[in-house]
Amino acid sequence: MTDDSSFWPNGARLAISMSLMYEGGGQPISGAPGVIPEPIKNGLPDMPTNGVFEYGIYEGTPRLLNLFDKHDIKVTAFMIGQAVDKDPALAKEVVRRGHEAAAHGRTWSASYDLSPADERQFIIDNMHSIEHATGQTPRGWSAYWVRNSPHTLDILKELGFTYYLDEASMDQPFILPVKGGDFVTVPYTFHMNDIVSYPFEGYNPAAYEQALKDEFDQLYEEGATRRRMMVMALHDRISGHANRARVLDRFFTYAKSKPGVWFARKDEIADWALKTRDKTPYLDRGPVQKTGLSGPSA
C-alpha cells in the first residue's frame, strides 16, 4: 500500500481489524470455561469442554480460513504456544495463507501475576513455538483475558514486539511510551467479540449480524473526518461454527460492497500508526500506566 495524506493507506475510509483467537489445545484439561454450567470436580478431565476446544482445531479454524480466502481478507491469529505445539501443521497453514501469527501465551492461562522473569519466559516460550511451526516471529501480543502486569509492555518491547491489543479504550490505534521507545496499542473489543455470546441461549444470529452492520455504518460515517477502526474478535471454537460462519460471510459481503474499506492485519495497522505519527494519538499515562492500571482488564 502506498502512502498518502489520508487516515489510512490508499485513501481508505475505514479499517476493519480482526483477531482470530487460536486457542484450541492450549486450555487446561479441567477448569476451562465451557458450555456446561456445572464445573468439573476433583480436577478430572472435562471431556465435553475439551471437545469444544478441539472443534476449533478440526473444524473452526479450517472453515474460517476458507471464508477469509473467499473474501480475500487477511487477519491476525493470536496463537497459544501449547496449541501450536499440538498441531504445528495447522499453525503453518494459517501463515501460508497470508495471515499474521501473533502471541497469546505459552498456555491459555494468566501471566499477570508471574514474576517479571517468569512472565518474560512465558512470552518467550510462546514465541519459540510460533517460530518453530511457522517460521514467523510474532510482533503482536494478547494476554489471557487481556490482563497484563505492570511489566508486560517493557518486556514486549525488549523482546522486539511492536504492539499489543489488550485495551478497549479507542476506535483507533494509539501509541504508548515504554522503556526503550514507543509501543502501539491496536485496541481490542468486547461488544464485537463472539465470546460474549458463547452460551447458546445468548446468541441471536440476526441480532449479531445487525450489530456488525450498525457498528460498521457508524464508524464508516465517522471515517469521513477522522481515523476510525472497526474491531472484531473471533475465537476458533466459536465463530468457526457453520451457522456463525454464514453470518460473517454475509457481513463481509456487505462491508466489501462499500468503497474505501481496508481489512488489515494488526501488524499493518501498527506499522501505519507509527508511520503516520502526526495522526496517531500519543498517550503518556505516567504513574497510571506504570502501575498497570492502563485500561480495561476483564
Image (tube, rainbow, N blue to C red):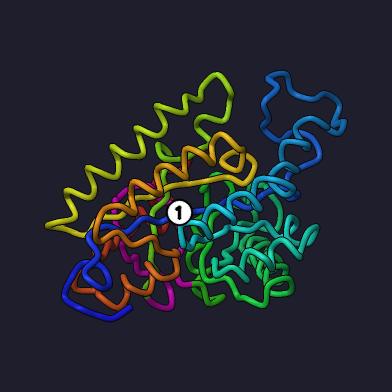
Image position of 98 with respect to 243: above or below: below
Left or right of residue 15: residue 138: right
Residue type, label 1: Met
- Residue at the image position 52 percent from the left and 46 percent from the top: 234
Q: Is mark 1 on a helix, strand or loop?
A: strand
Range of residues picked out in magenta: 162-181
Q: Position of residue 258 (x, y in %)?
A: 26, 53
Give the main secondary structure of the magenta stretch: loop
Image position of 219 with respect to 74: above or below: above
- Residue at the image position 53 percent from the left and 69 percent from the top: 156
**Closest to the observer: 161 or 214?**
214
Left or right of residue 6: residue 193: right
For mark 1, does the 10 Å Cα neighbourhood hold few (<14), some (14 to 19), or many (20 or more) residues?
many
Q: Where is residue 54 in the image (x, y as percent from the top left)?
A: 75, 43
**Closest to the observer: 77 or 110?**
77
Which residue was labeled with disc 1?
18
Quarter of the image for the N terminus: give it.
bottom left
Q: Residue furthest left?
A: 225
Q: Position of residue 236 (x, y in %)?
A: 62, 46
- Residue at the image position 83 percent from the left and 32 percent from the top: 47
- Residue at the image position 31 percent from the left and 62 percent from the top: 174
Q: Does the magenta stretch include residue 33?
A: no
Image position of 61 with respect to 217: above or below: below
